[in-house]
Image (cartoon, grey):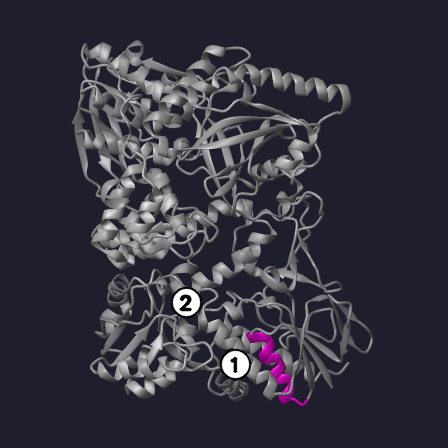
Amino acid sequence: MIVIGGGVNGVGVLRDATLRGFSVSLFERNDLAFGASGNSSGMIHGGPRYLSYDPDVTYSSCLDSGHIQRVAPHLLFRIPFLMPVFEHAGVQAKATLAAYDGFFTLYDKYQPLKAGKPHARLSKSDVQLLEPGLVPSQGGVSFDEWGIDGARLCVANARDALERGAEVRVHTTVLEVLRREDGSAYGVRYRDRRSGEVGVRTARLVVNATGAWAPLTASLGGLAPGAARLRPGKGIHVFLDRRVTNYAIATKAIDGRQVFLMPWQNLSVLGTTDDDYYGDLDDVLATGDEVRYLFQAVERVFPSIREARAIGTWGGVRPTLWGWGMNEDRLSREHDILDHAKDGAAGLYSMVGGKLASYRLFSEEMTDVIAQRLGRGSACQSHTLALPGGDETVDPMQLVLEGGMEAVTATRLEYRHGSRSLRILERMRRDPREAAVACACEPVTVAEIRYVIDQELATSVEDVSRRTRLGLGACGGMRCAARCGRIVAAATGQSPAQGLAMAIRFLRAAARRRSAAIGAAQARSEALALASLRAELGAAADEPEGAPPVSGADS
Amino acid sequence: MKVLVLGAGFAGVAAAFAARRAGATVTLVHGTAGASGLYAGSVDGPALPEQDPRKSALGELALALGLRLSAGTVLATREGVVRTAAGADTALLDLAPLAGKRIALVDVPRDDWDAPLLLGSFADSVWARATGTRFELVPLDLLEKSSQRRVSPFDFASSFERAERPAWLSAVLKDRAGPDAWLFGPWLGVKRDLARELTVAAGVPVGEVTSPLGGVAGARFEARRDALLRSLAVEVVAARARAVRLASSSASLLLEDARELSADALVLAAGGFVSGALRLSGALSGAEAAGFELSLAGLPPVQTHGEPIRPVSSLFGVDLAARGLKLLEGVGLAASAAGEVLGAPRVFAAGDLLAPQPPSVGHALLSGLVAGAGAANFSS
């Protein structure tokens, strides 16, 4: 079978179907986790929002969060949430607090499914003690969720499938879904965007798992635009140079929507927006308006956010299910499998909707359909077999002692790779110079860069960054992009000049993404960074700004 | 004639130098390190024609600051680029005279120094291929202890200034005769001119690549600048300025500690509009009603890319996503060719504050000389 799309649902089906004994090829036109999967809020949450009207969804979300935790324990990190009550006072605040308390008492029943801790009702002074930067509240509740690096999750799924014999082609765009005279799908015609190679791969089934691109992909099979209809919703996040709170703080934006300020990996993240999106899916950019909307909401309860240094933004497009006549927030986050036999294209399926937290379940459902249709395949194992790196725990101190790494470097490495960090350690043993830290902000070692090129399909600075978070810290890649470019170029048979050009593309794209979020503090650094880059890179750094070439043009 | 100079980067020190040469008494006020103290060691920007009358002043100033000005300078950067420049810190290796020769690239296992990859990058450069210049890797055992793999380039450079190290390093280079020049990382001393000492010892040019932000080139500039200001008898006041005040016969700076310094003329050379002299406010703040705020009160027209700036009709300030990051460098004061700020008699501006395209050390030096001379000769 063929899977189109290297987001979390695509690689989820790829892995599940491979585990069940199917032969699978995956095609991704950009990189793994290029879209919503790598640009989400980075949470595997238990779905408390469904509790009041559909508790079964909460149950299955929590259950699956527990499954993901068991197969990839290294990738999950606890995010304690704080939901303070700011509005009103006296009896009304007490009533709101009691309602929160009651609500999260119900949610507590599901927490054991995902090793979550029970909620706590907090007094005014508790809240102030936990987060002194908050304006005085009327009290609040805390509850427990899990964070995850969505890009790492995608890479781990793809890597596992690769090791079990699947084929994964990144930067390869599907030109056409091939159909027989009777309309049934039998394969794809593709084009490798790097080499220009065009080819055909045949299969019994084709799964369209392209998220927000789903309607576009369906049209490559000659289906009508409405056949895999979605209502894409853009969501952006702003990230700060450090963790400014211990708890994720949930609050309301000016329009009453829930937004948050959340500690996430080394950063703090403000999120998120939800707006109908009509733009280019390959080039989703946060705008100044969206950034200001989020800052305005957080500033009201956490005033010092104005002094914080915003170093970047990311934007993604949710593949929300189609609905007319309602506001974005009301749209369903559910998912659905479309069998295009109803459109005359037997053997072609589209996965529509879904969210990061439910990817495994969605993939299992899709693979069940496939197994049923093909009349074979073993039972699903994607919730019992560990993902690469998730099989055993590694003590970061071992990496410190044996690899000569600093503790923070070792901890971050172990987070991203779990037990596979031992393979990276092995590289350092063979060549101690690979222990050098190339990206000091994250930090990322040379060994890890080389490992993700060798083992995880990275072929550019941006690919490396997606897998390691290289260049996504406070310096914006200023100190590591060119070096990473040289390493990628040397490892992939390109010239140093091509490596430099790759680095400049990365730096320019990063500058473009962060320009929407630059405040006074970052502006001062920005002017210095421009001067430094000009000195280091010469004239190449001064090419005109502007949008990258239209990425669709080459397909 | 009394002249006040605000800022001690390349522009400020050039202004103080020119004003002293014109016979003025000079007081220089500066707060914290700026772009000059963080520079890479390369001089870029406009080149002066041979017959330009400012040439001799510029030459003298450059010498005092340890700069070698030459339009055909070729530098190697930390990022593996070989590029041309209008000059450089004398500790940087000028590759131009080494075209076609054999250059030893020092290999030290430091985290920030991937010599084998740099070698490939230098050798692959257009310049090296066009001139047939060869680079070769020479491992030198420069680490005294393994922790030096990760100390900052600045601290690593300082380690070579300890009593016995320069002589040891000289001996090492003498023993390794062969290459036509030695290219080091940015480590050749902060206070001592180690590059020159080693050049003498080795008998061939020894120098550095460019410095990272906050590396040794900026530190060397600051040391030489301080010595120059002392020799010029410029009074230096370490303080931050809060406001400029203009009176009918004087200009003054109001300092953060509430002192007020007055003079016949004032040179503003405190760095780029955004990064130093004047404050960008409100890009993300809801409470302030303007885009660019003048933190030095009473100053007239601000321009972007040569056009007068218009007030931003947004409660949230300038939208950089819509206007592009280059805007940050393009904002500056409008001034006459003599550096006099339009609409503000007795006030001169120099350096990045004038928003040259793009900001450069060369422009800072020249505009500083112009503004300093203008201020010293000011008459209402």
Q: What element carries label 1?
A: helix
Which quadrant would the N terminus of chain B be assigned to in this image?
bottom right
Residue found 59% across the figure and 24% down from its top: A120
Which quadrant would the C terminus of chain B be assigned to in this image?
bottom right
For marks 2 and 1 on the same chain, the one whose residue lies earlier in the sequence: 2
Relative to A249, residue A230 above or below: above
**Which residue carries the number 2 mark?**
B153
Q: Mark 1 lies on which chain?
A: B
Q: Which chain carries label 2?
A: B
Segment colored magenta: B10-23
**Place of residue B259 in the rendered image (x, y in percent of width and height, measured from the top left):** 77, 71
**Place of residue A62 in the rendered image (x, y in percent of width and height, measured from the top left):** 44, 19
Residue found 63% across the figure and 34% down from its top: A297
Relative to B6, residue A537 above or below: above
Label of residue A166 in the image:
none
- Residue B171 visible: yes
**Which residue carries the number 1 mark?**
B224
